[in-house]
Amino acid sequence: MARIAFIGLGNMGGPMAANLVKAGHQVTGFDLAAPVLQAAQAQGVTAASHISQAVLDAEIVVTMLPQGKHVLSAWTDILRSIPAGTLVIDSSTIDVDSARKAHEMASNAGCLSLDAPVSGGTGGAAAGTLTFMAGGSDEAFAKAKPILEAMGKKIVHCGEPGAGQAAKICNNMILGISMIGVCEAFALGEKLGLSHQALFDVASTSSGQCWSISTYCPVPGPVPTSPANNGYKPGFAAALMLKDLRLSQEAALSTGASTPLGAEASQLYALFEKQGNGGRDFSAIIEMLRGTSQ
Ligand code: NAD
């Protein structure tokens, strides 16, 4: 069993650290927010009073923080406090450029590093069923895999440093675009007098099939577990979808990739958030597309 430091114990990091404890690892945690740190303590995490204290004896360090700037600042402190050879894993969703910079910092300090963002949300974090998308060396991936398996059910090595973040934002750009497409089709079907169930029965078994319709249908009825049946309580909040779409557009800009539908999806989610919907599930955007959002 390993000595693990976990930095960032929020909605995702808290349950992920708890699963490491359940798997028998010795976990020391740090978070800037005291209530979050206390909640982690109740799950068996040893609370540290400073980031450098948390990582002192760690063989592996995991960070789960909001944005690239938080990760770079935390990794600066971490890399000052750990010996060469230690593995540092970032599971936050951040921009690819910051992820690559973090790898470079780790390499300069003689440490192993992995970007390993997740999909599966807070439910997956609690159940230990996250999907990890990893970028980094074979050596870093091999060392990280058993640890990631305590928090997730599918662990994919996507390639070189930054490849995990690249996979995450490309996947979520598909998701944002496909959700808007499915919502538009249901809104048009309503105008044409087509029942939700009829459109679902056809499109979910035809060429229009995708996760946004088959698993996460944005209208109530056809998929009883989708947030549409629960007042659009997230699930996956629209603000987080907007964050990921913006990351995809930053990456498109910095690489010169053409992503016109990603750009449009990003603008539509920005408008949806501006209308006060950032905390609702991202599939609720159907209301704005119908013109019925407040
Ligand atoms: P959160 O805001 O609940 O947790 C982030 C935590 O980091 C907070 O508790 C904050 O106090 C702490 N923090 C910030 N700076 C810190 C620092 N320098 N040192 C120590 N702690 C610090 O966010 P979350 O929902 O847990 O998301 C974390 C990351 O996971 C984000 O990048 C997010 O995009 C990604 N993600 C979230 C979800 C989701 O459904 N919530 C799903 C997939 C990926």
Image: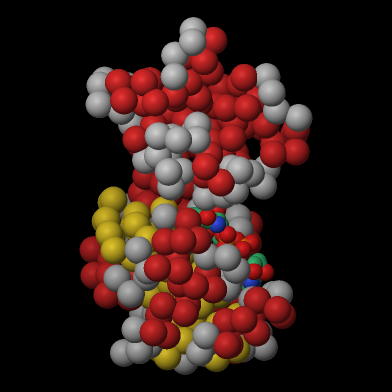
Nearer-the-camera pick, 30 or 75:
30
Res. 290 in view: yes
Q: Where ligand 1 lies, by quadrant? A: bottom right
Quadrant in which residue 198 is drawn: top left
Residue 256 against residue 220 in the figure, above or below: above
Residue 84 against residue 237 in the figure, above or below: below
Q: Quadrant of the C terminus?
A: top right
On the rendered structure, is 274 left or right of 256? right
Kindly identify the residue that appears in the image at 37 percent across and 61 percent down. 130
Residue at the top extreme of this rendering: 192
Q: Quadrant of the N terminus?
A: bottom left
On the rendered structure, is 130 left or right of 100? left
Kindly identify the residue that appears in the image at 27 percent across and 56 percent down. 156
Kindly identify the residue that appears in the image at 47 percent across and 92 percent down. 57
Nearer-the-camera pick, 55 or 26:
26
Q: Position of residue 244 (x, y in %)?
A: 53, 42
On the rendered structure, is 278 left or right of 8? right
On the rendered structure, is 12 left or right of 278? left
Kindly identify the residue that appears in the image at 57 percent across and 27 percent down. 286
Q: Position of residue 49 (x, y in %)?
A: 67, 88
